[in-house]
Image (tube, helix red, strand yellow):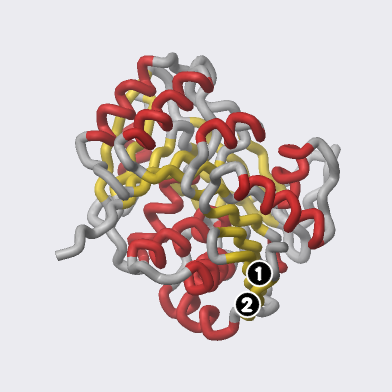
């Protein structure tokens, strides 16, 4: 009997996402806003939540501040995925997302928890209690203040030595750091891939060239998020671009995290790269149809999967 691939998500820098409505928001002015929801968030948490929505099990390892850890946990669907908490001094940070009708949302992200390299050893120990060869560990979001990138990279090296596949989606990593770690999957957007290569990358040929370069350096799956235009995947099977149908987005919070969740869901089912990307884009797009930090609905995912257009390109 074939072993089921386990998924473990790491959230080192979680946040409460506070969503507000400000009908007549004007920058540099006092604005009146109404709080509409306060959700437990963080990129790893969002991945686990999206997986849970479609019945895929995962384990979420979350670093929490002692001062408000219980409040954070109470806002999670603890019956839908496994939670492993690691607590440190301090409190979980808050993000404020301002929604204004007819305009893009405005986000204010505050600095998070501070810790030291000892927290990385605790996380590694926690992961290795569960993960074995060919399981997947996602490391997404910023690394906490006080924690060295070298310690995080060493943890990733140790996972790789154990045969564990890693996913990195964090702007704490430079291009050289990403290449050093050789993760199973990365998911930069157009802005992040521009930062990697130190120049503005916008047109298709430049994005493809950058993704090919990353793949040639040992990164098995390079997904470039293209926003409402979908996503590009460069992998061993070639280059694929998936384009979703046009939608009216309610919120883009967590869309990139859901994209990763959709890709990993397909991988655990041994789907080919084409199917993985279609599912990923359907997940990400479906998340934009939900308000706040809510996961995509199964109904929207299934409908969108039929409407996503996919094309293969020659890598030569």
Labels in figure, total: 2
The residue depicted at 54 percent of the width and 60 percent of the height is: 236
Q: Secondary structure at mark 1?
A: strand
Residue 162's spot in the image, x, y percent? Answer: 30, 36
The residue depicted at 52 percent of the width and 66 percent of the height is: 280
The image quadrant that residue 103 belongs to is bottom right
Q: Is residue 42 above or below residue 126?
A: below
The residue depicted at 55 percent of the width and 64 percent of the height is: 284
Q: Which mark is residue 241?
A: 1
Query: Is mark 2 in CB contact (under 8 Å) with mark 1?
Result: yes
Residue 104's spot in the image, x, y percent? Answer: 74, 57
Position of 44 with respect to 162 (left or right) is right
Q: Is residue 267 above or below residue 168?
A: below
Q: Which mark is residue 83?
A: none
The residue depicted at 44 percent of the width and 32 percent of the height is: 12
Tag 2 residue: 310
The image quadrant that residue 1 belongs to is bottom left
Question: Which residue ends up furthest to the left in the rendered image?
Answer: 1
Look at the image and tell me whether residue 163 can be seen: yes
Front in this rendered view, residue 215 or 257: 215
Q: Secondary structure at mark 2?
A: strand
Front in this rendered view, residue 311 or 89: 311
Quarter holding the C terminus is: bottom right
Residue 89's spot in the image, x, y percent? Answer: 38, 17
How packed mark 1 is, by other alpha carbons closer than 10 Å (few <14, some 14-19, many 20 or more), is many
Residue 83's spot in the image, x, y percent? Answer: 27, 43
The image quadrant that residue 68 belongs to is top left
Look at the image and tell me whether residue 286 can be seen: no
Please report whichever mark, 2 or 1, sits nearer to the chain's N-terminal start.
1
Position of 10 with respect to 107 (left or right) is left
């Amino acid at each position: 009997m074939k072993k089921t691939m386990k998924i473990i998500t790491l959230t080192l820098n979680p946040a409460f996402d506070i969503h507000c409505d400000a009908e007549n928001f004007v920058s540099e002015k006092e604005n009146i806003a109404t709080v509409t929801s306060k959700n437990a968030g963080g990129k790893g948490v969002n991945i686990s939540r999206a997986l849970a929505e479609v019945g895929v099990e995962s384990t979420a390892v979350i670093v929490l501040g002692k001062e408000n850890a219980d409040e954070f946990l109470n806002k999670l669907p603890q019956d839908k995925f496994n939670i492993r908490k690691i607590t440190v001094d301090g409190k979980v940070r808050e993000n404020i997302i301002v929604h204004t009708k007819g305009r893009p949302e405005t986000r204010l992200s505050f600095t998070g928890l501070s810790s030291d390299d000892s927290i990385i050893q605790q996380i590694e120990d926690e992961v290795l209690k569960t993960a074995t060869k060919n399981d997947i560990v996602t490391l997404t979001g910023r690394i906490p203040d006080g924690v060295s990138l070298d310690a995080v990279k060493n943890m990733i090296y140790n996972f790789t030595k154990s045969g564990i596949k890693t996913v990195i989606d964090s702007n704490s990593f430079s291009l050289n750091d990403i290449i050093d770690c050789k993760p199973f999957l990365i998911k930069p957007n157009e802005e992040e891939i521009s930062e990697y290569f130190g120049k503005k990358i916008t047109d298709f040929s430049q994005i493809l060239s950058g993704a090919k370069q990353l793949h040639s350096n040992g990164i098995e799956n390079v997904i470039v998020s293209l926003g409402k235009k979908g996503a590009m995947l460069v992998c061993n099977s070639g280059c694929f671009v998936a384009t979703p149908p046009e939608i009216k987005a309610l919120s883009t919070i967590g869309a990139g995290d859901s994209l990763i969740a959709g890709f990993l869901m397909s991988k655990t089912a041994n789907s080919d790269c084409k199917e993985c990307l279609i599912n990923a884009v359907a997940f990400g797009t479906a998340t934009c149809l939900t308000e706040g930090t809510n996961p995509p609905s199964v109904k929207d995912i299934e409908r969108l999967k039929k409407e996503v257009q996919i094309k293969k390109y020659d890598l030569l």
